[in-house]
Image (spheres, grey):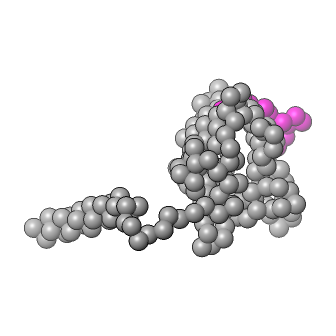
Amino acid sequence: MLRTRFTQAVGAVLVGGVAFAALTPLLPFQEPVKPDPEHRKVLAGVGEWEGSVIMNVPGMDEPMEMPCKESIKAIGDFWTTSEFTGNFGGMPFNGASTLGYDPVKKKFVGTWIDNQHPYMAMMEGDWDAEKNAIVLHYDMYDTMSGSFLKMRNETVHADGKYVITFFQLSDEGESEMMRIEMTKKVGEAVEAGSGR
C-alpha cells in the first residue's frame, strides 16, 4: 500500500511537471527565450552529411579510412541532435549526439552514445576564435586499458563542409586519434539559426 501511494505521488509530480512545461510557452507574461550568437554556431551543423572517418591506428603505417553518414536536426533554436552511421571493418556503427550552448555556464555542451560502448560521453567546451572551432573536452572510457582517457575534439564548419578532429590528452602531450571529414549533401543548404 505504501509503495502504491509512493508510485502515485511520483506519477502526479511527473504529470504535473510535464503539464506545466507544456503550458509554459502559452503564459502571456513570459518572454520567449532568445538564442545567443553561440546557438547559431551550433545550428551550423544542421543538414545531411556524407564523408569519411580517418583513424590513426597504432602499428599501422597508413590511417584507416571508412565511409560514414550523419543526419543533424535542430531542436528549436538551441539544440541539435545527430544520428551517425558507418561501417568499420565490416562492423556496423551507429551513434547519436546532442549539442547546444548553456548560457548560464557560458559553455558549449554535448553528449555522445553509440552501439559499441555502454558509456555516455558528457562534453563541455568553448569557442576558439583563432581556430574558428567549437572545442569540447570530455572523458572517454577505454575498454582496452579499463581506464578513462582525457579527450578533446575540435569542430570546424566552412563552405558546406565540416571537419571534427579528436585528440587524446596525456601528461606527455596530445596525439590526434581520429578525424571526421564531411560534406553537406546537395540541396541541404540551411541557414544557421533558422531553427530547422
Q: Is residue 176 above or below residue 124?
A: above
Q: Is residue 41 above or below residue 54?
A: below
Residue beneath the point at 87% across and 34% down = 62
Position of residue 78 measured from the top left corner of the image (x, y, whole percent): 58, 56
Q: Is residue 184 above or below residue 15?
A: above
Residue beneath the point at 75% across and 59% down = 135
Residue beneath the point at 66% across and 67% down = 107
Q: Is residue 155 left or right of residue 19?
A: right
Position of residue 72 measured from the top left corner of the image (x, y, whole percent): 61, 41
Quarter of the image where the N terminus is located: bottom left
Quarter of the image where the C terminus is located: top right
Find residue 149 and report its image quarter: bottom right
Q: Is residue 37 left or right of residue 21?
A: right
Q: Which residues are magenta?
A: 57-70
Residue beneath the point at 37% across and 61% down = 26
Find residue 188 and report its image quarter: top right
Judging depth in this view, the residue of 184 and 116 nearest the camera is 184
Find residue 154 and report its image quarter: bottom right
